[in-house]
Amino acid sequence: METLEIMPVRVRITAILRKAIYSGEYKSGDELSLTDVAARLGVSRTPVREAFQELEGEGLITLRMNKGAIVNNIDRKFVQDIFEMRILLEAEAARKAAENGMETEDLLRRLKDMREHMDSLDVRDYETLNQEIHQSIWRAADNHQLTAYLLELWNGPSVGRGENAAAHHYQASTDEHIALLEAVRDRQPEAAEQAMRRHIGRSMENMLSHYAAE
């Protein structure tokens, strides 16, 4: 039986902060306190400091000596560029997973059960399964560098704006994951690649909805 590789704390914190910046929860000029973020997430300052360093390398924040960080000006083009890179890499991972073969029965069973109980969905369960699906595909692609790059781009579920946006995303994402894994199961590389492109592409549009059209 395959086991889920739990993302390192640094990666998970970076993903949480990255998504908060992409979605505008943290806006340009906002100050991020190392201590406050650590307390909010219930972790020590060390992985938060490491996450800050990575986010600075990505151009999302600017570190201040002994004063945490300042969120940089992030525009629609910046977010689109990141998601377009994810589309390229994740689509290739899905193609390789379909070519190499991958155990999908348990994931598909859990997805279909989740789809039947959307009215009582536990978001944490969705987030865990979402992560497991993507990591399983990366692992099946059998390319260490590809996995490393995708970890650095990960931001978790990408919910758009508007009423019922979260519920719509979870429903659509679940359907997309099922189609994706069925293509992988059936060893259909092109179908798996296209399913992943649609999945990440919709997530990109969700994130771009937080920005004014240019």
Image (cartoon, rainbow, N blue to C red):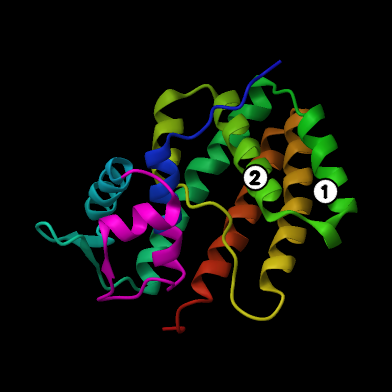
- Residue 55 in magenta stretch: no
Q: Is 41 contained in the magenta span?
A: yes
Q: Nearer the viewer, residue 83 or 118?
A: 118
Magenta-tinted stretch = 18-44
Farthest residue toward the top? 1
Tell me: 76 left or right of 2.
left
Q: Quadrant of the N terminus?
A: top right
The answer to whether 140 is drawn above or below residue 107 in the figure is above
Mark 2 = which residue? 130
| 148 is higher (above) or lower (below) than 111 | above
Residue 194 visible in rendering: no
Q: Are marks 1 and 2 in contact (CB under 8 Å)?
A: no
Name the amino acid type tagged 2: Asn
Residue at the image point whose x is 23% and y is 48% from the top: 53
x%, y% of residue 35? 28, 56
Which of the two discs, 1 and 2, labels the residue nearer the N terminus?
A: 1
Q: Which residue is mark 1?
A: 114
Q: Residues within 10 Å of mark 1 (few under 14, many from 20)?
A: many
| Residue ID at (22%, 50%) | 57
Of 111 and 120, the residue lying toward us: 120
Picture quarter with the C terminus: bottom left
x and y percentages locating residue 49 in the rendered image: 25, 47
> Which type of secondary structure does the marked residue at label 1 adopt?
helix
